[in-house]
Image (spheres, rainbow, N blue to C red):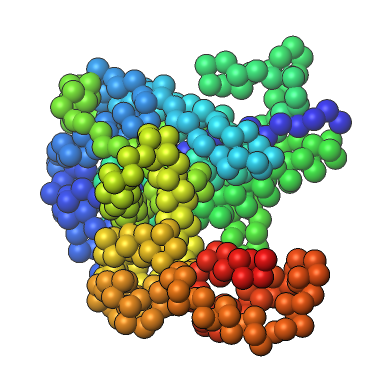
Amino acid sequence: MPKLIPIIGMEIHVELKTKSKLFCACKNDPDRTAPNTNICEICLAHPGTLPVPNKIAIEWTVKIAEALNCRINEESKFDRKHYFYPDLPKAYQISQFDQPIGENGYINLELLPGKNQRDTAKIGITRVHLEEDTAKLSHDASGNTLVDFNRAGVPLVEIVSEPDMASATEAKVYCQELQMIFRYLGVSDADMEKGHMRCEANISLQEEGRYKKEKGAIVPVGEYKLNPKIEVKNINSFRAVEKAIEFEIQRQTEMLEDGKTWKQQTRGWDDNKGETVLQREKETSADYRYFPEPDIPPFNPLKIAGTISLPELPQARRSRFRDEYGFSFADSEILTSDAHWSAFAEEVMSELIDWLHSLSETKSDTDEIMDNKKQQLARLAGGWLTSKLMGAMADRKIDIRILKLKPENFAELIALIYSNRLNSTNAQKILGEMLDANVDMDPTHIMEEKGYGQMSDERKLSEIVDDVIKSHPEQVEQYKKGKEPLLQFLKGMVMKATEGNADPQVAEKLLREKLS
Ligand SMILES: [Zn+2]
């Protein structure tokens, strides 16, 4: 059997959090629990009503398309997409067909280096278009289907990618990157659990060397017959994106190895069973009988693009966190995945860099020394932010949005550790106290009050070292005879005598001096 290559494309739908719906003035609140409260004649499709497009929704779609490096079209229009289903009161959806707002874009994914995969992947974006969301169906215990029209007419952006992803992990990272972009742009909370963001995957397996990509489509080479793709819906988390695709790759591989084939189909992901189940054989786009929406004139998204500016996007911020501050790859990923955390980290670093500069003024450090120090400080701060602080907050169920600890005081804690005035164990105690107090506290103050400070005063430590030498004559003798490891034992005794507060480097230095 020739090698099979997974070919994966994604379709993402994201609800925009505009104040009102796409074609009427109803409140846009798809999470509203009281059903059928945000509704009017337009979103219920009463005869004779006219849709009026929401300008902000169009603007935000242009923003998304720009962030995804799309070509913004000069002329765009809405089209009617016909299908009959109880969640669609007009029996057609107002969507966009051949003139979407944006086309031919891309994003670059950065993948964790070291894993068995490429570390960057350029994913083409076929199109970005705007449409209205459907109503929401639910089924009660006695088998009735209920319709809630609160969601009907909510602005929904569809983003179709090229089949450029080669693994389940790439697909997951792609979805995570898009979620971050939506959040950075402020156009959606993109919460997958709440259905703000929905992911569908197209997966096929093709024999290596028997196909090529042409204008984003997969075409056979020579006599080869392409294996049909499978569309997977109902994927409700990033974990499920990865699991569903892994499952499909495995399932299709087994079928092909058994010499079986199938028709293009749509399958649903069953998260409990951990498998995909057949829903239907796929309609072609002709089935929807698209035609231009006669009630909405065409518009010019390119003109809108000229009036908006994009904020710093996740990828740019990650690189900046690495290049400007010296955070590690992993820390910069974690810290930039949330706007509140990245703001906190930026303030911590700017405090620390100021502090470093104020220290070096007296020492007149070269740029190179400063850069090294900055990098050391960033590695230290990055580790403390992403593991110690995040961990301690998770234990106490404190969210960054309600954190009382100020970045200045966290930076001061890092500075105390960096300058060896505080050891890691005691720094963690102080951090715990700062979080438990639930008010902003000065770590130096706690350190002095509780006597947590590291003892590096040689005169004070000298007496303790003398005591340790006096009370361990056997070990001292053996050390003097050449048993080097006993120095570590004696150092341990000094640490114990000072309840862990002695500066280990100073303790070792004194021991060596006194025993030489
Ligand atoms: Zn309405």
Q: Residue furthest top?
A: 222
The image shows residue 422 at horizontal and vertical percentages of 43, 69
Q: Nearer the viewer, residue 158 or 468?
A: 468
Splitting the image into 4 quarters, where does residue 310 fall?
A: top left
The image shows residue 507 at horizontal and vertical percentages of 56, 70
Q: Is residue 193 visible?
A: no
Q: Quadrant of the N terminus?
A: top right
Q: Nearer the viewer, residue 91 or 470?
A: 470
Q: Nearer the viewer, residue 261 or 341?
A: 341
Q: Is residue 409 visible?
A: yes
82 to 405, vertically: above or below: above
Splitting the image into 4 quarters, where does residue 28 fall?
A: bottom left
- Residue displayed at 25% across by 17% down: 74
- Residue displayed at 31% across by 71% down: 444
Tell me if 317 is positioned left or right of 58 in this view.
right
- Residue displayed at 75% across by 24% down: 208
Q: How many marks?
A: 0
Q: Residue furthest bottom?
A: 471
- Residue displayed at 40% across by 74% down: 453
155 to 204, vertically: above or below: below
The image shows residue 325 at horizontal and vertical percentages of 39, 43
Q: Quadrant of the C terminus?
A: bottom right
Tell me if 235 is positioned left or right of 194 in this view.
right
